[in-house]
């Protein structure tokens, strides 16, 4: 996961202003190849463009980086970071995997939650991190998201959520599966309180997260070209023994089929989310 | 130990086990099947309708696998499409409107993985069921009678009570899928089955299900009568509980809260 290498530690992302966006750390990797147009992009250029290639390809972005990009300066206040995964099923190799990933990702779990202001609008925000076990949902992810929706309902705040996930975390077995029901019930309570939930689906949003809170927002946005689906493309190919249509399970595909509201470029997200928050807050 | 868990998986998949339709026929009186999701089509993998449990009108929904090769193919091997989950939700909302309790029988290797299923929003269909079932104001009892395959099973199991047949399984992923993703070797399915803690006993220990039902005399009149009696007894209790929806919330809320701080 080479993108990781040029990210600075989280505090600088949290406290730095937009103009002081973190710069690449890895001197050994001055350029990055775009998987879409195959051009080499200088890292500094990629950073300046919020990890978007000139061709429009959106690279994956770590949770803290996204929070830095979307929330107002110094407004993010993290919650529930004390919750850590154990190994409730004694699943072979899980503890070791968690420890490795905690070091490599710089996060202690696959979602970062808190309160923030976006364009001066107060909200609750969660941002998942693909660098932490591909954003898989175990007990901690479920617990943090559920707690956030409960907090938002109590405090009458909207929720903005960025999803990225390979699905439920199999190392926590049924406990992971149940997080789908748990988070959904919390989303429902928040919704029944008349409060707004905006989801932004980023690459990839699949499996149990698609089949729960990603698809339960009032307004569902997605980044261009993101993989959005339920079953994995490889599994579908194996099951059906058919080649998949071009563009299958992309943001554009799910928009065409009526399952998301809008595709929005990274550079337009803050403005659009601000507008949506304002409109739902009396104008 | 690992062999044991995988043996359970094989038993749960055995096509001689009673299927959803067998349970419906033998437990409920005068079942009337109701078809279609009113949006796209009628999914043959899910059977739903109205019946009587002794004298209580109930809505019954079952994932049906079929027994013979022909039946199984006609039922898409019990792998529902989005329209199946939407039919189920339509019937559940109808049950709520008319104050009928809901009873679900679950037996699926999972929601269908296919192009059409994705085009019609498999993830969205499951998500909507999870969302809506959490606040339906009628009692819901779900029974896992064979395989409880991941989100495709959970989409009918956001219930007040979830029971498992002794040799049914409930899992976030199939042991074969888990072994192939984690260890790149589907032959390690036995190890995966044991690691996933997917047996009825495991699920009960994890607080995911309330009750394990004996398979003694499975398929006989006595067997179905026993289940009918249990359902009646449980529904009687649930029906007079004014805190039903709140307790359903708490039932799922407490799962996976014991995380290390
Ligand atoms: Zn490019």
Image (cartoon, helix red, strand yellow):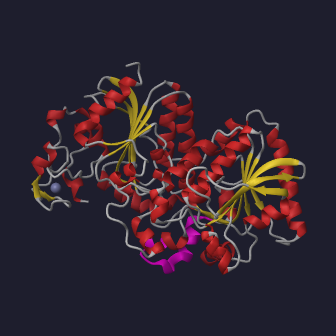
Give above or below for B10 relative to B145.
below
**Which picture quadrant has residue A185?**
top right
In the displayed image of the protein, which residue is found farthest to the top?
Answer: A282
In the picture, which quadrant includes the N terminus of chain B? bottom right
Nearest the viewer among B12 and A110 is B12
Residue at figure coordinates x 19%, y 50% from the top left: A56
**Which picture quadrant has residue A186?**
top right
Give above or below for B139 relative to B47.
above
Give above or below for B79 relative to A149.
below
Residue at figure coordinates x 45%, y 62% from the top left: A94
**Which picture quadrant has residue A29?**
bottom left
Magenta region includes residue B260: no
Residue B87 drawn at (x, y percent): 63, 52
Nearest the viewer among B42 and B212 is B42
> How many marks on residues?
0
Left or right for B112, reference B42 = left
Left or right for B116, reference B10 = left
Residue A237 drawn at (x, y percent): 42, 72
Left or right for B28, reference B258 = right
Residue B174 drawn at (x, y percent): 55, 69
Instruction: Tell me which image quadrant ligand 1 sits in.
Output: bottom left
Magenta part of the protein: which range?
A: B179-198
Residue B3 drawn at (x, y percent): 62, 78
Q: Main secondary structure of the magenta part?
A: helix
The answer to whether residue A132 shows anywhere in this view is no
């Amino acid at each position: 996961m080479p993108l990781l290498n040029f990210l600075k530690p989280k505090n600088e992302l949290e406290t730095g202003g937009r103009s002081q966006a973190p710069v690449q750390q890895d001197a050994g990797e001055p350029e990055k190849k775009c998987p879409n147009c195959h051009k080499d992009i200088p890292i500094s250029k990629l950073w300046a463009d919020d990890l978007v290639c000139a061709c429009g390809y959106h690279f994956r972005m770590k949770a803290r980086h996204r929070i830095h990009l979307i929330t107002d300066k110094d407004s993010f206040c993290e919650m529930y970071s004390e919750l850590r995964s154990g190994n409730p099923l004694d699943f072979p190799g899980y503890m070791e995997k968690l420890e490795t990933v905690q070091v490599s990702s710089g996060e202690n779990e696959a979602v970062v939650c808190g309160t923030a202001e976006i364009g001066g609008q107060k909200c609750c925000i969660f941002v998942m991190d693909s660098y932490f076990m591909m954003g898989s949902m175990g007990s901690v992810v479920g617990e943090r998201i559920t707690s956030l929706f409960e907090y938002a309902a109590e405090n009458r705040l909207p929720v903005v959520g960025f999803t990225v996930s390979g699905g439920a975390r199999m190392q926590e077995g049924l406990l992971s599966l149940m997080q789908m029901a748990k988070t959904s019930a919390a989303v429902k309570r928040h919704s029944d309180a008349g409060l707004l939930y905006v989801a932004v689906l980023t690459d990839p949003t699949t499996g149990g997260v698609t089949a729960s809170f990603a698809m339960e927002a009032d307004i569902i946005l997605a980044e261009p070209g993101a993989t959005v689906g339920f079953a994995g493309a490889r599994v579908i190919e194996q099951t059906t023994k058919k080649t998949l249509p071009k563009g299958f399970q992309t943001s554009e595909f799910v928009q065409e089929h009526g399952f998301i509201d809008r595709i929005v470029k990274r550079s337009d997200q803050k403005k659009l989310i601000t507008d949506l928050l304002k409109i739902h807050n009396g104008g | 130990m690992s062999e044991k868990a995988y043996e359970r998986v094989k038993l749960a998949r055995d096509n001689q086990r009673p299927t959803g339709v067998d349970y419906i026929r033998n437990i409920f009186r005068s079942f009337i099947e109701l078809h279609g999701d009113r949006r796209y089509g009628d999914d043959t993998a899910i059977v739903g309708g109205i019946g009587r449990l002794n004298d209580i009108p109930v809505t019954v929904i079952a994932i049906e696998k079929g027994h013979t090769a022909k039946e199984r193919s006609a039922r898409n091997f019990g792998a529902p499409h989005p329209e199946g989950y939407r039919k189920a939700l339509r019937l559940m909302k109808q049950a709520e409107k008319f104050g009928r309790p809901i009873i679900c029988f679950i037996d699926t290797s999972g929601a269908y993985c296919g192009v059409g299923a994705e085009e019609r929003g498999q993830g969205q269909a499951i998500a909507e069921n999870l969302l809506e079932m959490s606040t339906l104001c009628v009692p819901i009892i779900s029974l896992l009678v064979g395989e409880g395959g991941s989100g495709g099973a959970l989409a009918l199991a956001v219930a007040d009570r979830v029971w498992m047949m002794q040799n049914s399984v409930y899992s976030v992923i199939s042991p074969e899928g888990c072994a192939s993703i984690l260890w790149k070797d589907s032959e390690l399915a036995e190890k995966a089955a044991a690691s996933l803690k997917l047996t009825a006993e495991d699920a009960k220990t994890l607080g995911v299900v309330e009750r394990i039902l004996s398979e003694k005399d499975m398929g006989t009149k006595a067997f179905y009568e026993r289940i009918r009696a249990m359902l009646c007894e449980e529904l009687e209790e649930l029906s007079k509980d004014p805190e039903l929806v709140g307790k359903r919330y708490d039932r799922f809320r407490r799962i996976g809260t014991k995380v290390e701080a």
